[in-house]
Image (cartoon, helix red, strand yellow):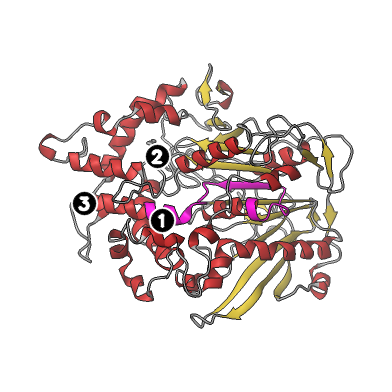
């Protein structure tokens, strides 16, 4: 699904690479803490330590490069120089670079008669740091976004291109004008699911070799939302190609999450007090902004202090679920009269069902539950009370359902969502038929998702982060996956994969949270120096920020920071200034 994932302040310079004998792949033998399993058990073998990247310089100029570019089934439509300052990030000029645009595998679909191709853009800095960065899109893809290398969190202060990376972005095999009906074409489905990344990666590395006289020493991948899904799929399917993979708020079970969104809409429809112009329940009236603010306050009242500080952030989200009860901690409306200070019995049932996650009529879980957290503002509402009846049913109808629905459904998406059957429609994400030889579950999700042994044994690393107030992709789903990944690695996956949950953060950014952070710099240090990130500093974008987050309460101190802790550790207050990360420890 759609998100904006952007970078934060540059961190300290990297230290020298670890010493040791060099392996044939540029790695060195170094001891790593943690259990070194194969994905199904444990091993005493230390993981390889990958060596640091070495810089390079663009050979010649863009015009000279254009004459050399060639790759099978690829058309390079633009090769041009971009002067320094043409692009900026947080007011800072991005250095001079070469822009390359093109497409791969252009074809005419035999199913819908439309022309498809995998569109891409690459930006190659003149002063190169020896690294490659794949910038994954969000949502339904369909746009070749500017390949600056957005690197996670809210409020950009830097990006991978300005840090010296060669960067690629793509539309994942279809144009925005083809959304959401690209799902009618079986190959477009596969390109969107996994094939665009697999196809573009070797081409991009060949272009880099032509441009700099050598291929990238180290390759990194980052995305949030559907881009986070792309990242986890790449960790499984393209493990030989990427050394560091960063996955934000991953929709790695996206077909189930779309079902979960429609389930939530159906619950809110039961308690709606008004109808739309189309005569359907207005689900925004099922849980109003005033009521959401009240419930968030009740959650904070029960959970805020569990981490040692009453500061508007619920760091111990697990303990919160055991302490907070929607039934007893939120006032019930007298005579079921709603006035914004209470919830009716029917509302408590409906909202409780929404947070409990989608179920079929037999009670079987169709998607994960969501944790109760404080981020119930506009970002939460946008997904639960808007996208749930527009974007998600479109994805479900045409891309995740086999056989796909008729295009006539486009004008009836809200009705489709509110009448989606959890018993008969939901199983279609696992179905195949006719020209659709792979199910949505097959092409959208990482195969054997807890077996990342190929990535691990190369010495590559994985960082996942997730906002605990994410309303579309549940952080509970991600923590469950990480627990299973740990089990598959002898009970500890921290020597190659770490998860960071972010209190109050909505989908990829926003919410009452410290949502501005840089995961790329610590990832480089981990991959190339063996320095595992025991915490990552995140900042709240208050009114003094260059890119303020309106969800940050005015009562918070200016420039509040917090450590993001590797799961299952929690940022707990020790002593000192409550707005300083140094007053908290991960334990």
The percent coordinates of residue 323 (x first, y second) are 35, 26
Residue 553 visible in image: yes
Of residue 279 and residue 6, the one placed in the foreground of this image is 279
Which residue reaches farthest top? 575
The residue carrying mark 2 is 375
Q: Secondary structure at mark 1?
A: helix
The residue carrying mark 3 is 272
569 relative to 401, above or below: above
**Disc 1 residue crowd, few under 14, some 14–19, many 20+, Cα 10 Å:** many
Q: Secondary structure at mark 3?
A: loop
- Is there a contact, CB below 8 Å, between mark 3 and mark 2? no
Q: CA distance from mark 1 to mark 2?
A: 20 Å
The residue carrying mark 1 is 258
**Disc 3 residue crowd, few under 14, some 14–19, many 20+, Cα 10 Å:** some
Relative placement, left or right, of 148 versus 354 is: right
Relative placement, left or right, of 34 versus 508 is: right
| N-terminal-most mark, 1 or 3 | 1
Give the image quarter of residue 425.
bottom left
Residue lying at 39% horizontally and 66% vertically, measured from the top left: 397
Q: CA distance from mark 3 to mark 2?
A: 21 Å
- Of circles 3 and 2, the one toward us is 3
Q: Secondary structure at mark 2?
A: loop
The percent coordinates of residue 282 (x first, y second) are 24, 56
| N-terminal-most mark, 3 or 2 | 3
Q: Is residue 47 magenta?
A: no
Q: Which residues are magenta?
A: 236-260
């Amino acid at each position: 699904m759609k998100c904006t994932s952007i970078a934060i302040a540059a961190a300290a310079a990297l230290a020298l690479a670890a010493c040791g004998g060099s392996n044939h792949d540029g790695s060195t033998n170094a001891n790593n803490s943690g259990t070194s399993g194969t994905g199904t058990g444990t091993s005493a073998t230390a993981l390889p330590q990958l060596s640091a990247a070495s810089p390079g310089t663009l050979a010649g100029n863009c015009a000279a490069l254009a004459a050399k570019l060639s790759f099978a089934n690829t058309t390079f439509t633009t090769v041009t120089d971009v002067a320094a300052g043409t692009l900026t990030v947080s007011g800072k000029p991005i250095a001079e670079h070469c822009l390359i645009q093109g497409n791969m595998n252009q074809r005419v679909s035999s199913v819908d008669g439309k022309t498809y191709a995998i569109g891409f853009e690459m930006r190659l800095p003149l002063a190169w740091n020896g690294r490659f960065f794949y910038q994954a899109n969000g949502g339904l893809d369909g746009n070749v976004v500017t390949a600056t290398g957005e690197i996670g969190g809210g409020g950009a202060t830097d990006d991978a291109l300005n840090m010296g990376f060669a960067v690629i972005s793509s539309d994942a095999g279809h144009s925005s004008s083809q959304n959401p009906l690209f799902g009618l074409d079986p190959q477009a489905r596969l390109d969107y699911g996994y094939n665009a990344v697999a196809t573009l990666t070797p081409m991009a590395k060949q272009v880099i070799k032509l441009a700099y006289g050598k291929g990238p020493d180290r390759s990194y991948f980052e995305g949030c939302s559907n881009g986070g899904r792309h990242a986890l799929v790449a960790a499984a399917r393209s493990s030989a190609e990427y050394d560091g993979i960063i996955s934000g708020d991953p929709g790695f079970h996206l077909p189930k999450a779309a079902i979960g969104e429609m389930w939530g809409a159906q619950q809110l429809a039961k308690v709606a007090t008004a109808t739309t112009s189309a005569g359907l329940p207005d689900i925004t009236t099922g849980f109003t902004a005033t009521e959401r603010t009240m419930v968030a306050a009740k959650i904070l009242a029960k959970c805020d202090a569990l981490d040692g500080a009453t500061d508007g952030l619920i760091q111990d989200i697990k303990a919160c679920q055991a302490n907070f009860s929607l039934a007893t901690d939120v006032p019930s409306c007298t005579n079921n009269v709603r006035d914004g200070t209470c919830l009716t019995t029917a509302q408590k049932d409906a909202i409780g069902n929404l947070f409990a996650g989608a179920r079929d009529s037999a009670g079987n879980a169709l998607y994960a539950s969501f944790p109760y957290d404080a981020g119930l503002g506009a970002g939460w509402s946008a997904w639960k009370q808007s996208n749930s009846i527009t974007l998600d049913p479109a994805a479900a109808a045409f891309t995740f359902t086999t056989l796909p629905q008729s295009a006539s459904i486009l004008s009836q998406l809200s009705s489709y969502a509110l009448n989606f059957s959890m018993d008969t429609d939901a199983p279609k994400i696992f179905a195949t038929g006719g020209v659709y030889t792979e199910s949505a579950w097959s092409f959208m999700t990482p195969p054997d998702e807890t077996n990342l042994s190929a990535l691990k044994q190369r010495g590559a690393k994985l960082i996942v982060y997730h906002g605990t107030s994410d309303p579309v992709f549940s952080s509970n789903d991600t923590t469950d996956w990480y627990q299973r990944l740990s089990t598959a690695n002898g009970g500890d996956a921290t020597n190659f994969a770490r998860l960071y949950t972010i209190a109050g953060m909505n989908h990829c950014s926003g919410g009452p949270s410290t949502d501005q952070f840089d995961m790329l710099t610590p990832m480089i240090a981990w991959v190339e120096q063996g320095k595992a990130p025991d915490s990552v500093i995140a900042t709240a974008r208050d009114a003094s920020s260059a890119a303020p987050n309106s969800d940050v309460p005015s009562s918070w101190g200016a420039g509040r920071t917090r450590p993001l802790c590797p799961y299952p550790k929690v940022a707990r207050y020790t002593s000192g200034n409550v707005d300083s990360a140094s007053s908290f420890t991960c334990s």
